[in-house]
Amino acid sequence: MNKIHTWRLIIGLIGLTLIYSCKDKNVEAPEFNVDTDKAEYKVGEVVNFKISGDPDVISFYSGEKGKEYQFKDRTTANGKVSLSMTTQVLFGRQPNNLALLYSTDFNGLYDAANVRAATWTDITSRFKLSTVVPGGSGVQTPSGVVDISDLPVSGKPIYFAFKYTGDAVTGTTPTQNTWRVYAFDLTNTLPDGSVLNVSSASTAGWLAIDFVNTANKWTIQTAAPFIFFNPNSTLVASEDWALTKALFPNNVDPDVAAPIKTYLQTVNDYKYTYTTPGTYTVTFVGTNGKNTGSSSVVKQLTIVVK
């Protein structure tokens, strides 16, 4: 088999993760080494990694956040899960008629019966919502950043829902409030300090579900306010929900390597510059492969950047 066909097979094996590693008794492990002139460098100084040997493929992990070999297979990470939002209430005279709920057993079927069948827990009291004097206009109110790390269940999605409840009016003057949601930011802060953006008001995948008074429902749009409920001066009772898609706050993308050598290349060195001080575990993965499999060797160095 020629080199070009062999390389295509290697790409098929390792292209998605860059360094998919396995051993095959018919594939010889690569012999290579990596060295530097020194172990300490200054920020902005070029690090020249000298490479000896000739693996078919070489991949590089700098050791920076998002580029660490130790996390190449990581798909979940427990961190501090936080939620913040910004709301605004307008007009009306019915207090406390918006609630924020969550569920970890909703089956993902967005109709009234299946939403009712799920277990929903009210967490409104954890957040600061907009307030208004009767008939007036409230201001956009940030809720504050709230730690909700206790809510997600490992291996299960979490759903959030805004529940609007409007009481029937006995007279002829509408009293139900208008509610707007300008921000809804769910994040996961990992132990290394990196912050993963799980969802926002524009990416949460909102869907509106009518329960009572189907003439009115949540409006979902691509510009702020991203979701809002306007009672349209109704005098009859209303109950309407806006639900997110399934969210996985603890899911993370695996760290990935930079490919620095392909099958047809010859590489004697690799230059890299660090922009932040720190101690980095640098990893090079050399791989030989053919149609029966592949074999990899890992080389690691510690670089201190001051």
Image: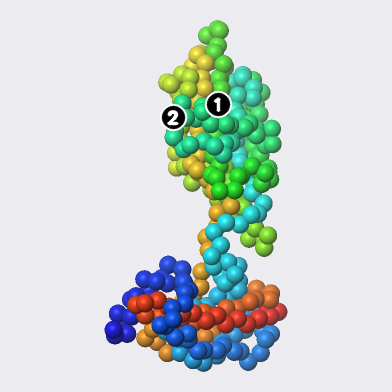
Instruction: Return the residue at label 1.
Output: 164
In the rendered image, is residue 71 in sight?
Answer: yes
Above or below 237: residue 120: below
Q: Amino acid at mark 2?
A: Asp
Q: Residue furthest front?
A: 25
Q: Quadrant of residue 303?
A: bottom right
Residue at 66% across, 39% down: 143
Residue at 61% across, 41% down: 85
Above or below 172: residue 165: below
Where disc 1 sits, the SS reads strand
Within-10-Å neighbours for mark 2: few <14, some 14–19, many 20+: few
Instruction: Return the residue at label 2.
Output: 111
Q: 197 or 114: nearer the eye?
A: 114
Residue at 30% across, 80% down: 5
Residue 117 point in image, percent of width and height: 51, 28
Above or below 161: residue 199: below
